[in-house]
C-alpha cells in the first residue's frame, strides 16, 4: 500500500515533529464543545469535525444522512464561529432506514427548528433521497462531503460514485462507520478499496471515521499537511482524538444524566405544587365552612325563638345539675 505522501505530490516530505503536532492535525478548534449535544453515534468525532472545518475552510459542505443533526450542526456551528463564507446542505428523507432505525416526524421538526433559528442564512435542509438531491448541487463545487447514509457496501459505493463529480478540486470526503463489521455493514470493505487510491486516514474510535482527500487538482496545503503528519504520527493522532472523543462522550452522558435528573426534579416539583394547591384549596374550603357555621350560630343566637326558649334551657340545666 502506498503512503499518503507518495499518493499526493503536494504533501510535504518531512516537517519537524513540533510543527506537525502544533498545527497540522490539532488546534484550539479541536476543543470546541458541540452546542447541540443530542444522542448520536457521531459524538466522538465532534473534535475532529471542528478541526477540519477550521483547517480546510470549505465553501460548500454537503452531508448525506443527517438524522437528528448532531454532526451537521457541528459543521454549521463552525461556519458561524469561524466566520466562513460557506453554504451547507443536509440531505435526508428524515424517515430512517434499516441501520439508523425508523422514526417519526418529530425528528425532522426538531432539526428544522434549530436550523431555521440559528443557521437558516446559509444552511438548507433537502428532504429527499441522495439521488434526488444530485440535481440541486453543482458539479465540482463540494469541498467537504460527509457520507452517513445506509451502510451496506452497495449503498455507500453508489453514494460515493454518484456524488464524486460534485467534489471540488480540493474535495475531502468523510465516511462514518468504517469500523463497523456487524450484520450487513459494508462501509469498511468499500473504505479498504478507496483508501489506497487517494490520501486517506482512518480513525478507529466512535464506529470509525475515514478521511479521504479526492481533490483532482491536489489538496489544500492544510489537508496535505494533515495527511503527511498522518504518515508519521498516525497512532498519536488516533489516540489523541480517541481521548477527546471519550471525554466528549463522557461529558455528554453526564449532561444527559443531569438533564434527566433535572426533568425528574421538575416533575416532582410540579406534583408537589399540585398537592400543595389541593391542600390549600381544602383548607380554604374548611375555613369557609367554619365561617358559615359561625354565621349560622350567630343567626340562631339572635333569633326570637332562641330568646323565648332561654328560660326553658336554663331550667333544663338546673335539673341536670340537681
Image: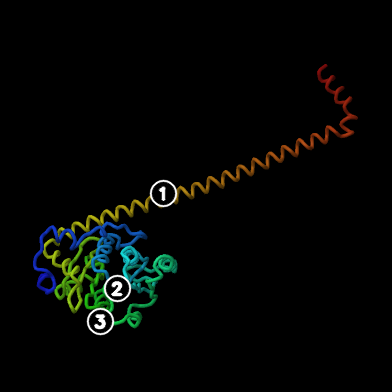
Question: Residue 59, labelled with which disc?
Answer: 2
Per the image, the residue denoted by label 3 is: 165
Instruction: Compute the Cα span from label 1 to label 2.
Output: 41 Å
Q: Is the C-beta separation of discs 1 and 2 under 8 Å?
A: no
Between residues 211 and 77, which one lies in front from this camera angle?
77
SS of the residue at dot 1?
helix
Q: Earlier in the sequence, mark 1 or mark 3?
A: 3
Q: How far across and down, in percent of the image, does residue 24 sit? A: 18, 63
Question: Residue 51, labelled with which disc?
Answer: none
- Residue at coordinates 64% horizontally, 44% vertically from top-left? 281
Q: How far across and down, in percent of the image, does residue 1 sit? A: 9, 72
* Image quarter (top left, top right, bottom left or bottom right) of the C terminus: top right
Q: Is the C-beta separation of discs 1 and 3 under 8 Å?
A: no
At label 1, counting other C-alpha atoms closer than 10 Å, the crowd grade (few under 14, some 14-19, many 20 or more) is few
Instruction: Compute the Cα span from label 3 to label 2.
Output: 16 Å
At label 3, counting other C-alpha atoms closer than 10 Å, the crowd grade (few under 14, some 14-19, many 20 or more) is some
- The figure's colour scheme reads rainbow
- Residue at coordinates 73% horizontally, 38% vertically from top-left? 291
Q: Can you say whether 279 is above or below 54 in the image?
A: above
Q: Is the C-beta separation of discs 3 and 2 under 8 Å?
A: no
282 vs 200, left or right, is: right
SS of the residue at dot 3?
helix
Q: Earlier in the sequence, mark 1 or mark 2?
A: 2
For the question of whether residue 169 can be seen, the reply is yes
Per the image, the residue denoted by label 1 is: 261
Q: How far across and down, in percent of the image, does residue 171 sit? A: 23, 75
Question: Which of the 4 quarters of the picture holds residue 145?
Answer: bottom left
| Mark 1 or mark 2, whichever is nearer to me | 2
103 vs 208, left or right, is: right
Q: How far across and down, in percent of the image, does residue 169 sit? A: 22, 78
SS of the residue at dot 2?
loop
Amino acid at each position: 500500500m502506498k503512503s499518503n505522501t507518495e499518493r499526493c505530490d503536494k504533501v510535504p516530505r518531512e516537517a519537524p515533529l513540533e510543527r506537525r503536532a502544533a498545527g497540522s492535525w490539532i488546534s484550539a478548534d479541536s476543543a470546541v464543545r458541540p452546542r447541540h449535544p443530542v444522542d448520536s453515534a457521531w459524538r466522538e468525532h465532534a473534535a475532529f469535525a471542528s478541526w477540519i472545518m477550521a483547517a480546510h475552510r470549505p465553501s460548500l459542505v454537503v452531508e448525506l444522512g443527517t438524522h437528528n443533526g448532531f454532526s451537521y450542526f457541528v459543521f454549521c456551528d463552525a461556519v458561524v464561529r469561524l466566520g466562513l463564507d460557506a453554504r451547507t446542505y443536509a440531505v435526508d428523507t428524515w424517515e430512517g432506514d434499516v441501520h439508523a432505525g425508523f422514526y417519526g416526524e418529530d425528528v425532522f421538526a426538531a432539526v428544522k427548528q434549530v436550523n431555521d433559528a440559528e443557521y437558516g442564512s446559509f444552511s438548507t435542509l433537502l428532504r429527499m433521497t441522495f439521488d434526488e438531491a444530485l440535481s440541486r448541487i453543482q458539479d465540482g463545487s463540494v469541498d467537504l462531503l460527509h457520507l452517513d447514509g445506509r451502510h451496506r457496501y452497495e449503498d455507500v459505493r453508489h453514494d460515493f460514485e454518484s456524488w464524486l463529480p460534485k467534489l471540488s478540486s480540493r474535495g475531502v470526503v468523510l465516511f462514518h462507520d468504517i469500523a463497523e463489521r456487524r450484520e450487513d455493514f459494508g462501509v469498511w470493505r468499500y473504505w479498504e478499496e478507496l483508501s489506497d487510491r487517494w490520501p486517506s486516514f482512518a480513525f478507529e474510535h466512535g464506529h470509525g471515521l475515514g478521511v479521504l482527500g479526492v481533490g483532482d487538482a491536489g489538496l489544500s496545503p492544510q489537508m496535505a499537511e494533515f495527511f503527511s503528519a498522518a504518515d508519521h504520527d498516525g497512532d498519536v493522532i488516533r489516540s489523541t482524538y480517541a481521548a477527546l472523543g471519550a471525554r466528549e462522550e463522557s461529558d455528554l452522558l453526564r449532561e444527559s444524566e443531569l438533564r434527566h435528573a433535572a426533568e425528574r426534579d421538575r416533575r416532582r416539583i410540579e406534583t408537589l405544587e399540585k398537592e400543595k394547591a389541593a391542600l390549600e384549596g381544602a383548607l380554604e374550603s374548611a375555613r369557609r365552612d367554619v365561617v358559615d357555621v359561625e354565621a349560622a350560630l350567630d343567626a340562631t343566637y339572635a333569633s326570637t325563638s332562641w330568646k323565648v326558649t332561654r328560660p326553658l334551657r336554663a331550667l333544663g340545666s338546673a335539673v341536670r345539675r340537681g
